[in-house]
Structure formats: C-alpha cells, structure tokens
Image (spheres, rainbow, N blue to C red):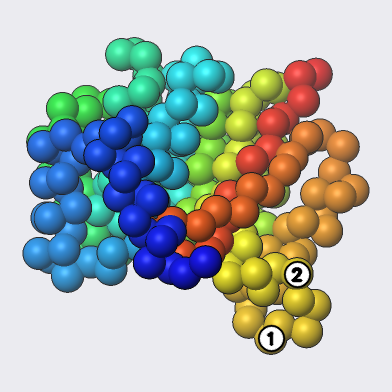
Amino acid sequence: MEERVFAEVDQFIGETIVREDEALRASVEAAEAAGLPSIQVSPPQGKLLALLVRLVGAKRILEFGTLGGYSAILMARALSPEGRLISLEAKAEYAEVARRSVERAGVGDRVEVRVGPALEALPALEQEGAGPFDLVFIDADKVNTPGYFTWALDHTRGGGLIIADNVVRGGTLADPSDPDEATKAQRRLHEMLSEERRVEATTIQTVGSKSYDGFLIARVKAA
Ligand code: SAH
Ligand code: DHB
Ligand code: MG
C-alpha cells in the first residue's frame, strides 16, 4: 500500500461524504498564500472532530494549536450557537490569518484566538473560569502534549473528550529507542494514561493525505 493510494482515498472521501465549502477552501488558500505550513487536519479527520463535537453536545472547546484556523472552523461550526471555542496559537501572524478565515466562515462570534505559547495562556484561562471544557483538542508543539493533556484532565467535565493529534508519528510510537523528543512525549503520554483512572482512552492509527499518524481520544469519566 502506498502513500498515493491513501491520498487518493482521502480525495474520494472528500468528493463524496466530506465536502469542503467555499469558506473552508478559502481558509486553506489563505494559509497557503501567507506561507503557513500545510499541516492542518485532513478533511476526513476534521469531520471526525466535528462529529465528536456534536456527539458530546460541546458548548466549550479548547484547542491547542490554531495554525490557519481549519480545525477551529470545523469544530466551531459543530458547536451549538451559544457555544464558544478558544484556540491557542504561538505565532501572531498565524493567529491573524486564522482570525480572518474564521470570520469569513461565519463563526467569528464563537471563536477566540489567543496568541502566545499555550503553556503561558493556561493560568489566565484558569483565572477567568473559562472551563470546564466539553472537548479539548491538543495539536500544538508535540513535546508538550503530555503537559497539555495533564492540564486538560483537570479542566474537562465528566463525559467530555480530550483528543490529541499526531501521536503515532509514522509508527515510531512503538519504538522505545526512537530518539525524537516529540515521539518520546507520545510514548510518555500513553504510559501515563495506562495508570490514569480518570479517563477511558484509545489511539486510532490513521493514513490518508497526511501520511501515517494517529489520534488519541480520551473520555473523562463522569464523577
Ligand atoms: N489544529 C490546526 C493545526 C495546528 S498545527 C488544524 O488542524 O487546522 C500546530 C500549530 O501549533 C502551529 O500553528 C504552531 O505555530 C502552533 N504551536 C507550536 N508551538 C506552540 C505553543 N507552544 N503554543 C501554542 N501554539 C503552538
Ligand atoms: C506537524 C504538526 C501537526 O499538527 C500535524 O498534524 C502534522 C505535522 C508538524 O509540526 O510538522
Ligand atoms: Mg496535527
């Protein structure tokens, strides 16, 4: 099986059950034009996020890693109208591109993009009482995924979801000798969750236009 086939299947899925509308396509084009890396979730992955938002009836979402706003738009559209999504982005110029695309997609009133390293944004969120969140999507700097997850555990309601992208990393997740810090962090996260009684979790390996990777999906147990 080759990468080409994975991408072709994503394309077919995109032409049938997962359609991008004009605003979503425009967000990808705006990100490309501004020189942002093309590392947003694939359309089928984004649809999974949107379905999960609907399944938990999420009203409050926290996202780590905005990029050009692609996943934020998909999740925000799946929120109930009174719902809110806060997205944390380290780079001011990415956040600006994202804000414009979010506005164009008609969800500007529900989405707030905050600029700065995510770890530094967390104390303010706590002080404001921004949580508890119904869904947290972790997709920023991968070495900090375990740290973000730990914070999310304390700020997600029972029955809520914590989702982390890019945990399989071309299969290196299973290699204890892999020297990459981002991979080691995902191994640590899995080891941590093997002992964590507050969540039920799984990791789903994915292929597609974004090659071989995977999502970790954890449900916080109701108290
Ligand atoms: N969720 C997006 C993709 C995010 S890509 C989507 O699917 O559309 C990862 C993003 O995390 C990049 O935009 C990067 O600038 C940002 N990032 C990296 N380190 C970060 C940090 N410490 N805090 C917040 N964002 C960070
Ligand atoms: C990268 C980041 C992502 O969130 C992703 O899904 C793929 C790649 C990266 O930083 O290279
Ligand atoms: Mg990602």
SS under mark 2? helix
Q: Earlier in the sequence, mark 1 or mark 2?
A: 2
SS under mark 1? loop
Label 2 near ligand 2 (CB < 8 Å): no
Residue name at image x 15 percent, y 27 percent: 106
Q: Eyeballing the image, is 112 above or below 64?
A: above
Residue name at image x 68 percent, y 38 percent: 218
x, y (%) of residue 52? 51, 28
User: Distance from label 1 to label 2 (Cα)?
Assistant: 12 Å
Residue name at image x 87 percent, y 37 percent: 197
Mark 2, residue position: 174
- Give the foreground label among 1 and 2: 2
x, y (%) of residue 57? 50, 15
Observer-nearest residue: 31 or 13?
13
Mark 1, residue position: 179
Q: Quadrant of residue 107?
A: top left
Q: Is residue 187 left or right of residue 166?
A: right
Inspect the image, locate mark 1, and give the three-letter code of the amino acid beneath it. Pro
Q: Is residue 139 left or right of residue 187?
A: left
Q: Are marks 1 and 2 in contact (CB under 8 Å)?
A: no
